[in-house]
């Protein structure tokens, strides 16, 4: 699917993205903290860039996505001890930056890296 045009994405951000993203981040964090809802939380975390600016979601089924990844065990340990709380701080800092004109580019960069901060998951492509 082709990327949406800049004006459409900008309008989305102005009218929806800036308020929807912090809600999504905090719901995802709550899901991650409950243990049972971690799969839902991870999926919501991966949708954050789309919620913010309608960026096309990246496919988790990409065969190249396994290249360069940490092992699942390393990622799980990281998530349990660091990822769940650091991703909450990271995403809320990005949400704050997103509502400022000057901080918006940094916020978008931060949101695009949220899956890595959460679980060391690297997107390719």
Image (cartoon, helix red, strand yellow):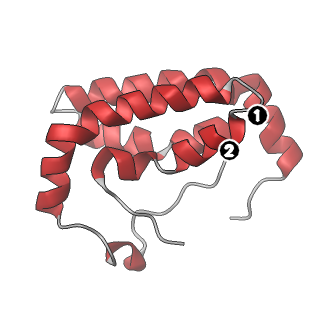
Dot 2 surroundings within 10 Å: few (below 14), some, or many (20 or more)?
A: many
Above-or-below relation of 75 to 47 = below
The residue closer to the viewer here, 108 or 49, is 108
Residue occupying image coordinates x 48% and y 50%: 113
Residue 106 on image: x %, y % = 63, 41
Q: Nearer the viewer, residue 38 or 118?
A: 118
Residue under numbered circle 1 = 12
Task: Give coordinates of residue 109: x percent, y percent.
Answer: 59, 48
- The answer to whether marks 2 and 1 mark residues whose Cβ atoms lie closer than 8 Å is yes
Under circle 2, the secondary element is loop
Image quadrant in which you'd find residue 16: top right
The spot of residue 70 in percent (x, y) is 23, 67
Q: Which mark is residue 54?
A: 2
* SS type, badge 1: helix
In the image, taking residue 99 as reference, residue 77 lies left or right, namely left
Left or right of residue 110, residue 11 in this image: right
Furthest-right residue in this view = 7
Quadrant where the N terminus is found in the figure: bottom right
Report the label total.
2
Quadrant where the C terminus is found in the figure: bottom right
Q: CA distance from mark 2 to mark 1?
A: 7 Å
Q: Is residue 26 left or right of residue 48?
A: left
Res 101 → quadrant: top right
| Earlier-in-chain disc, 2 versus 1 | 1
91 left or right of 121? right
Quadrant in the rendering for residue 28: top left
Q: Residue furthest front?
A: 102
Q: Which mark is residue 101?
A: none
Characterize the local packing of mark 1: few (<14), some (14-19) or many (20 or more) Cα atoms within 10 angstroms.
some
- Tell me where residue 59 appears, x and y as whole percent: 47, 63
Which residue is located at x 60 percent, y 44 percent? Answer: 50
> Which residue: 34% across, 58% down?
121
């Amino acid at each position: 699917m082709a990327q949406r045009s800049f004006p459409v994405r900008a309008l989305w951000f102005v009218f929806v993205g800036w308020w929807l993203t912090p809600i999504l981040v905090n719901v995802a964090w709550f899901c991650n903290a409950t243990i049972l809802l971690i799969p839902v939380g991870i999926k919501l975390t991966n949708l954050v860039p789309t919620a913010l600016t309608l960026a096309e979601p990246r496919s988790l089924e990409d065969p190249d996505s396994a290249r360069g990844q940490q092992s699942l065990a390393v990622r799980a340990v990281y998530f349990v001890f660091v990822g769940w709380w650091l991703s909450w701080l990271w995403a809320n800092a990005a949400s704050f930056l997103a509502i400022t004109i000057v901080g918006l580019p940094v916020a978008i960069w931060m949101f695009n890296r949220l899956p890595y901060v959460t679980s060391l998951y690297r997107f390719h492509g």
